[in-house]
Image: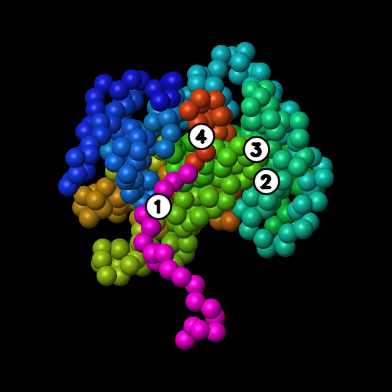
Amino acid sequence: MNEMSKPATQTVTVTLDGTNRSTTLPLLPGTIGPAVLDIRKLYADLGVFTYDPGYGGTAACESKITYIDGDQGILLHRGYPIEQLAEKSSFLEVAYLLLHGDLPTKSEYETFVKGVTYHTMIHEQLRRFYDGFRRDAHPMAVMTAVVGAMSAFYHDSLDINDPRHREISAFRLIAKVPTIAAWAYKYSIGQPFMYPRNDLGYAENFLYMLNAVPAEPYQINPVLARAMDRILILHADHEQNASTSTVRLAGSTGANPFACIAAGIASLWGPAHGGANEAVLKMLAEIGSVKNIPDFISKVKDKNSHVRLMGFGHRVYKNYDPRAKIMQQTCHEVLAELGIKDEPMLDMAMELEKIALNDDYFVSRKLYPNVDFYSGIILKAMGIPTSMFTVLFAVARTVGWISQWKEMMEDPSQRIGRPRQLYTGATARDVTPIDARG
């Protein structure tokens, strides 16, 4: 058992029907949340495995980083509610928290910010990687490739068993991923790459690299910078989701952190995961106009139509997504700051929000607007193209991935991931020579 775990206070006895074989399994309690049945000796004692497609009922690791209660709509990072972190902290404070377990003191924060700030530039030879892509390459393809290639440039921090190497890799990934992301965008639109500026904050610098051009000065809008900072905070970590599990699984083999984060980016690319806010904008484009919403809602309610309402509901949250409340407030702040009115897509989004919060069909099914719904609207209003939505998600989630990877590497019970299967294929059979096969 992991040395960090609490000892079992209860047990569960499992008996295999039709045999005299049984086993007693410990029930491991967490600090909060449901207890976990330790099934590691189930196969040895009874000769059976468990079957859990998607791992929806399986704890694959022990973690102290993030806790989610989907029924109550609770999200905690190291015990701190996401609402308080989004209101009172910066993204780099949250990054420090996820990595180290506590919010930093003023001096710790200044040292951490300096460590991130002076790693923002990427190796100049990495510029050439971008030239190898077509102009219409998806930015996530570029992200996956360039982040994976970092291991070919930063040989001095690849010893995963050295705490100092892990720390340097964390700094490099958190600092350089925004630069890599911004350059992927600039390449796609044919504009010059903008080098990072160390006089700007994390979110400000990211906006600068995305939007500035050499021909004229770029003014940072503090409302938009704060909105970007909140978006990064709200996407920083989310427990053992698909991409985080991918990072942990890759890391369990001993792969270097750059390869692990590249694997996480590839996993995040899927439309069922990081592409959800992009799907919201696609849905709005298909609706076309506010006047078409009643017909669209009718199709959503018709179980035979297969029309889905994107950006509403969540696999984990069976209540209101706590991140969505903050994002809703941020959304209205951004729209007010930009003076956006009579924008068809945003008008449709606001009307859908109103319906979902008041229509019994959606309220009874707890199909509340989620974080993807509002983040898509915000990014659209800020002029960021939909192809970059998942890239921004990756920028934010990098700190969660590297924190989870670091925790796993420091876990004495860590072992290579190796899921089992329920085999339903052919039984053993002999090979017939090809000439004899009818």
Residue 421: numbered disc: 1
* Residue 300 x, y percent position in the rendering: 30, 63
Task: Please report contact status of discs 1 and 3: CB closer than 8 Å, yes or no.
Answer: no
Residue 256: numbered disc: 3
In the figure, 344 relative to 381: above or below? below
* Residue at 72%, 46% in the rendered image: 149
Q: In terms of sequence position, does the residue under pointer 1 or pointer 3 come before the other?
A: 3
Q: Amino acid at mark 2?
A: Gly
Q: Amino acid at mark 1?
A: Gln
- Tell me the SS state at disc 3: loop
* Residue 180 x, y percent position in the rendering: 69, 44
- Tell me the SS state at disc 2: helix
Q: Which residues are magenta?
A: 418-438
The residue identified by callout 4 is 415
* Residue at 82%, 45% in the rendered image: 125
- Tell me the SS state at disc 4: loop
The residues bearing labels 4 and 2 have C-alpha atoms spaced at a distance of 23 Å
**Is residue 82 one of those drawn in magenta?**
no
Residue 119: numbered disc: none
The residues bearing labels 1 and 3 have C-alpha atoms spaced at a distance of 27 Å
* Residue at 36%, 54% in the rendered image: 422
Depth check, front residue: 380 or 402: 402
The residues bearing labels 1 and 2 have C-alpha atoms spaced at a distance of 29 Å
